[in-house]
Amino acid sequence: MSQRFAAPTLGLTALAFLLPAASIAQNTQIRPHSMYEPPAAAAAVSLAASTKDVPADELTTGEKTSFEKTARYQEVIDLARLYEKRSKYIKVITFGTTPEGRPMTAIIVSKDKAFTPEAAHKTDKAVVLIQSGIHSGEIEGKDTALMLIRDMAVTNHPKQAAWLDKTIFVIIPLFEIDGHEDRSPFNRAQQQGPDITGTRPQEQQLNLNRDYIKADAPEMRAFLKLYNDWLPDFMFDNHVTDGADFQYDVTWDMTQHEDIGPGSRAWVNSRFVPELNKRMEADGHLVAPYGGLRGDFPGTGGAGLANGNAPGARAAAAGAPGAGGGDDRAARSARPSGNGQRDFNVEVFSPRYSHYWSGARNRPCLLVETHSLKTAKTRAWANYDIMVHSIDIVAEDPQALRKAVRDSDAADAAMAGHKDLQMFLGGKTADSSHPIVYHSLKRASEISPITGKPVMHFTAEKDDITVNMHDGVDTTAAAPVPTGFLIPLAWKSIADELALQGVVMERTTKDLGDQTFDTWRFTSAKKQSTPFEGRTFTDYTLQPVSERVHMPAGSYYVPMNQPRARIIMAMLHPAAPDALVRWGFMDAIFEGFGRIGAGEYLSVPIATKMAADHPELWTEFDVKVKADPAFADDADARLRWWMSRSNYQPSAANKYPIAEVWTKNW
């Protein structure tokens, strides 16, 4: 246990204000947590078994110090090279360079010595990717990943060694390297060890776990290349969460609704999740979905208690960039509290985050969230075991997972060109619920000499309460998948972003002229007042339109009958919560420069003359007015209808430059 949390808690009264500050500092402390640890954590049987009889030079610093300390990045490189030296099944590779010039290291573990993506794919074995330290202060996954490598291929533990008969591993023990080396005892002061840790963002102050779509960070661009080359069937992203204390020692999340393809969804729900929970509980773990407790609880003043990056009350007030987006995960699940109602809401994310991004690639990803208020050793035990049991499930029938992934890719590709089929783009925590017993901890309060008011804290006394579990997803955005998208040559930067994701594209060999395509106009565009992840997010209202769009030779055609259809929709469809246009990749289109016929006094006469010259258009217009009340009441929409059919070129301001293609005619 970290020394800074070892002091006992004494009740404080108003008399505390009469004590000298030094006396208060030495003798009292309002506990930041309950000191509750699961009973099985003391023995941590799996950690002990992994460490037993291992030579000292093969142990991580975490193992040597009961996880109260974590070593610098050089230990990762040194241990990886040592393991490589002692096992013919291990290969250390460098796959990128950080902004501060450090090499990014991955470790390949393969019994076939399939140390390249091409060799690995020829084996037809499942590929598992383990990623730790994307937030470098949340660091136990670094040690546990190295322990698994040692178990599999150096000390040859029977269970772990057997994995290599059916699986190949790509392991990134530490993703966010520069921040890891920016060490301080103050980076994660609220966390129960290690005593010195790294930072949350990388050195350009970007949060890598918000960067999977926009890929601004050099580290993320290197990762995407690695991922696209290896194309793993399953992925881990190891984290440590903050927020309300509870009995659970590990929480998790995965895409398991419409946010992942049907084959993968079925595998996750019918095979993986039931087995994972059952096996973890058999080993003494208490496991829950990653989410937030909301409602009225004694001692909280009615404020919600979130298992997320911030307490629920702050999260709800913080706001969120984009549709369903936001830096604070709890914001996406905030629900009204009051009237004694208690809810547990499973988070809903978007593809800027690791596990939803992987889900948009149809590859299941387990987001692992141990808890900062449990000891570092407890966190390591939980992190190690949840990876072991997950890999067991995959390795028992890897071809079932591989088939599920391939089926999902095929199903997504088959949606192209079908206007009657809708692909999920975004969602929110479901309104529907079912009762569960939530394993919380009781709360108490003490007078703080700092605030002069009661401050709530958790006790080690169990508080098993019945709550309404909201673990479904209500769709907030969906759209049919076009046959393809066209990106004008001038917007090559957008094609470059798709290329980072491994998207297949074609180049047009001739000028397509000014054809009419389906696209969108934006209204009510509003930039956020403060930057978010190095960009200023844009919200807007979408207006579907059919307009003439010039596509010169060399423009980019993105066919949608490809396995990456879901990630393409997440990036290019402007209704998606993490669409590139929201992230600021096309901000110039929101600048108005005026146009011919911009005012009604100019454009209405044009439309009136068109109606007189083209009675067939008037008939079509009249039918739409009578059939569509919303259109009939929208003067701007009525005028746009006529202007889009005129020979006058509307301004590019507020016009989406990318077009949908439903029939490819070139």
Image (spheres, rainbow, N blue to C red):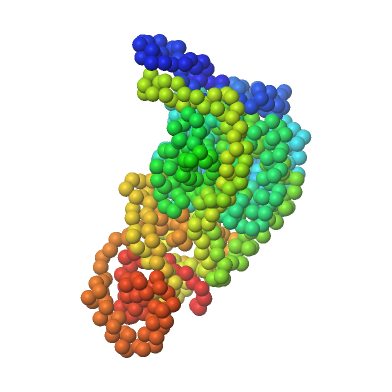
| Residue 559 % position (x, y) | 54, 67
Q: Eyeballing the image, is 481 above or below 500?
A: below
Q: Is residue 86 visible?
A: no
Decide: is 349 above or below 57.
below
Foreground pick, 638 / 396: 638
Q: Tell me the residue at 70%/50% (across/down).
A: 270
- Residue at 64 percent across and 48 percent down: it is 234
Front residue of this view, candidates 422 and 125: 422
Depth check, front residue: 621 or 516 = 621
Where is residue 572? Give x, y as percent: 46, 61
**Left or right of 591, for residue 403:** right
Q: Name the side, left or right, on which 476 lies relative to 563.
A: left
Viewer-proximal residue among 472 and 236: 472
What residue is rendered at 47% in x and 40% in y?
A: 338
Residue at the far front: name it: 339
Res 490 quadrant in image: bottom left
Q: Report the residue at 40% width, 45% height from top.
A: 319
Image vertical order of residue 417 relative to residue 146, above or below? below
Does residue 461 appear anywhere in the picture? yes
